[in-house]
Amino acid sequence: FNGTASGEDFPLAAGSVLWVEFNAPNMADLGAGAQNTLNLAVGLNVFSYTGFPVGTTAYDLIEHIGADNIHALRFFDAFAGCWRSVEIKPDGTRIGHDFAIPRVATLLLDLTHPLSGWKP
């Protein structure tokens, strides 16, 4: 509180997710990103990326990865205070509206196959 951390300190483990909630719309600056390629596993992947191409939308990203490889794509829009998501049904039907993905974003991708060396 008042600009200082509070609570119990704990070690972070590789492969775990740390969720930080602010009391107002904010973005945590984690420094300059290298915009390297990503290796994504089957199932839920949570990652931050600092170089999404300007104008990228959820549907663009789905097409780029392949709709047959995605169960769902989720993005927490801190400024709107809500989750944006698209689910892909087995028949290819998309449930959810297309939405813009900011240049710097944290996404949750639920994949059906691993994706190695991927770069948005």
Image (tube, rainbow, N blue to C red):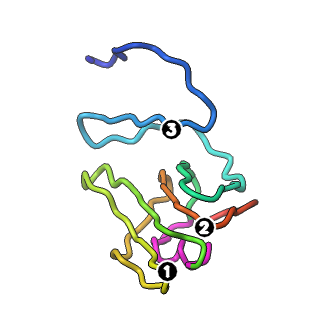
Label 2 packing within 10 angstroms: few (<14), some (14-19), many (20+): some
Foreground residue, 85 or 101? 85
Q: Could you tell me the amino acid type at mark 2?
A: Thr
Residue at 60% over, 67% down:
112
Q: Is residue 84 left or right of residue 107?
A: left
Residue 64 visible at all: no
Q: Quadrant of residue 61?
A: bottom right
* Mark number, residue 67: none
- Residue 97: % across, % down: 33, 76
- Residue 27: % across, % down: 39, 42
Foreground residue, 88 or 96? 88
Q: Is most of the magenta stretch helix, strand or loop? A: helix
* Mark number, residue 17: 3
Report the magenta residues as a range: 53-67
Q: Is residue 99 left or right of residue 114?
A: left
| Residue 12 lies within the magenta run | no
- Residue 87: % across, % down: 42, 71
User: Quadrant where the C terminus lies?
Assistant: bottom right
Residue placed under numbered mark 1 in the picture = 90
